[in-house]
Amino acid sequence: MRRTPLALAFAATLALAACSPASEEAAPPADGTYGDTAAAPAAEAPETTVDREVQADPMDAVLAGDWRDPANSARDGFRHPRETLAFFGVGPSQAVVEISPGGGWYTEILAPLAQGKGRYVGIINDPAKSGNERAQQYYADANAKLREKLAARADVYGNATLVEIDPNAPVLGEPGSADVVLTFRNVHNWVMAGNEAAMFKSFFEVLRPGGVLGVVEHRAAAGKTLEEVKTSGYLPEDYVIGLATAAGFVLEEKSEINANPADTKDHPNGVWTLAPSNNHEEADKAKYAAIGESDRMTLRFVKPQAETAPAQ
């Protein structure tokens, strides 16, 4: 079986650990000598290339992977994947569920990171249960493209799984089977479809107690109500927090990793005016390019630990 660069890096880490001494270095005598020979401590060995590779963050290899679409990598400066996933506590040995991965922007990062000790599951809509004929065709095409992407690089995506769901009655997997559930820029779609409560309930059910729900979503201007922004792609932060807490989650922390103060949030075609959709007049290209992508909330929730039975 062909082993990926990421898998080789993990293997090198384990091999080095196996060769390392188990005990800590002894402290020098109080009188300043080093035993009967009074020898000075040995010079520290120079760092080798192997040492540097072993010590490297696995995320380095993933973000630099040749499987990533260059157009996707170019958006790292707007989406901050390293910082965002660190904030959510995502690591290579976890069971990660990504909701509605779309074209696979984050799949290109999450699935290779989980290759080996972890597990990646992408949740996609069953086209037959996704509304009108236009919506059904959209999801059929999107799902086919995502499957093609994964099949084209089985060496890095071979352990990834895609699961189709009914978005109005979602079941993401066995209860308590996931360590992390992640959703990037999807909540507004569920709000417009009216199935947002069902989706958040399904996140809670699939997570283990203590598991993390990570949410990145377009953030509406302060003071805006849901009805004012519902069709714009932006959502009030308090509303999104309310969806999660109503499902049973506890808000653990907020981050401004994906904030963009330049986003005025008053665009003619809502959030789709901005990159990467760029739904605007050609004459406004420079104006919207200067803004970049949307201002986004980044929220980490936790599923509370199960209550323990009282002592008898």
Image (cartoon, helix red, strand yellow):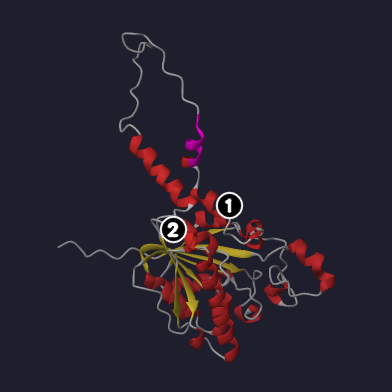
Q: Which mark is residue 64?
A: 1
Horizontal side of 171 relative to 299 (left or right) equals left
Q: Which residue is located at x 74 percent, y 74 percent?
A: 267
- Name the residue furthest front: 1
Q: Main secondary structure of the magenta part?
A: helix
Q: What span is in magenta?
A: 47-53
Q: Which residue is located at x 48 percent, y 51 percent?
A: 6
Q: For mark 2, what is the residue?
A: 115
Q: Disc 2 marks which amino acid?
A: Gln
Residue 191 seen in the current view: no
Q: Which mark is residue 24?
A: none
**Does 158 appear in magenta?**
no
**Residue 255 point in image, percent of width and height:** 56, 58
Pick the front one: 252 or 68:
68
Q: Earlier in the sequence, mark 2 or mark 1?
A: 1
Q: Quadrant of residue 270?
A: bottom right
Q: Secondary structure at mark 1?
A: loop
